[in-house]
Image: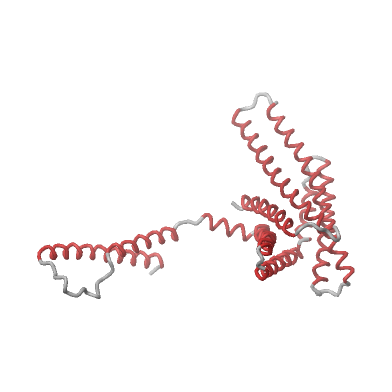
Amino acid sequence: MSREAAVDNSLDASAVLISTEEGSSSQNTEKQSVAQPSEKEPKDKGMPAPVSKLRGNHILALALRRMLKGPAPTLDHIIRFLSSGSGHDKFWMITQYFTKIVVWLFAKRGKKSASERVRTLSNLVADYRIMIRLTGLVPMAQYVRYAEQFPAQTRVLQWLDRVMNLSLVCYYPLEHIYWLGAHRILPFSEKLVDFSGYWSCRFWAAWVALQFVHLGEEHRLIKGRKQKIYTQEKIDASKMQQELDAVDADAKSWKIQMLINACYFPLTLHWSIRGSTFPDVAVGVCGTIAALAQAYNVWNATA
């Protein structure tokens, strides 16, 4: 017998039990109208559960069966999100940066022990995210090939892509050297580890700065596309609306990318400057906003 059949049979048995109890209850009522027991007679201790309780259990079982047997699109979406490499990273990115805010809140309230425990979690997650980026050069190499095979819309964007890709090609190995040396996995000197850590962040900061230029060029193209749609002659209204919707979708994506970049910019400067006084809670706020915005993009992409 299958699991569903077993559940159905048990529910049918519950229904029979309820109907039986209802019948016996009505019969007892008729008998009591003829001869009522005296108050001194003891109550039976082995009486079955009340009808209302059995009916409530039956309804709950039916609701659970319907919920578990039916489709679960939200759960499926969450699994697709977490199964993707980007979604997995964004989940831990939110954890890494939001816990910095929690650390600040606990410290402000004098909960030192709780603050230190959450700080440990935040540091472990940050370390884990660096570790899983040890393979980052592989997809980076694929993206460089893709960018050359399918050039950008303008010559400015094409050269910006090349310089930005170069900065990431420099960033990844320096971060690898820093992580492997900091954990004593490879015998790098402390001077090399320190140098690699700062310069990896500086190359990342260069990428973020160039991304502002890239976004500026994209914004110019989006405005040009929208103006071109409005000035077209002999265009169907439905087709015009479709083109406008596509431009609006690109404009919305542009705004999200600008928000992400604006949040990353102070972080990359903070990690690139020796002795920076940028507060850790501000790192948490900027990082959390950037992580949520990126998670929103991945969530839509895995719909």
Question: Which residue is at a point 31% across and 62% down the rendered structure image?
Answer: 55
Q: Is residue 221 left or right of residue 6?
A: right
Query: Residue 75 appears at what percent x and percent y?
Result: 53, 58
Q: Quadrant of the N terminus?
A: bottom left
**Residue 239 sits above or below residue 88 on the image:** above
Quarter holding residue 219: top right
Query: Is 73 displayed left or right of 26 in the figure?
Result: right
Q: Residue at x 77, y 36 (%)?
A: 220
In the rendered image, the vertical position of residue 267 relative to residue 128, given as above or below: above
- Residue 37, how many percent across, how many down? 14, 69
Asked where in the image residue 87 lies, by quadrant, the reply is bottom right
Residue 210, image x, y percentages: 82, 48
Which residue is the extreme one toward the top?
A: 233
Query: Which residue does the image show at 89% across and 68% down from the upper left?
Result: 192
Q: Is residue 22 shown above or below 286? A: below
Q: Position of residue 140 (x, y in %)?
A: 78, 57
Please tell me which residue lies in front, 27 or 111. Answer: 111
Of residues 29 and 224, the one nearer the viewer is 29
How many numbered discs, if any? 0
Q: Residue at x 65, y 34 (%)?
A: 244
Residue 139 appears left or right of 49: right
Relative height, residue 227 to residue 71 (above, below): above
Toward the left, the furthest residue is 34
Colour convention of the picture: secondary structure
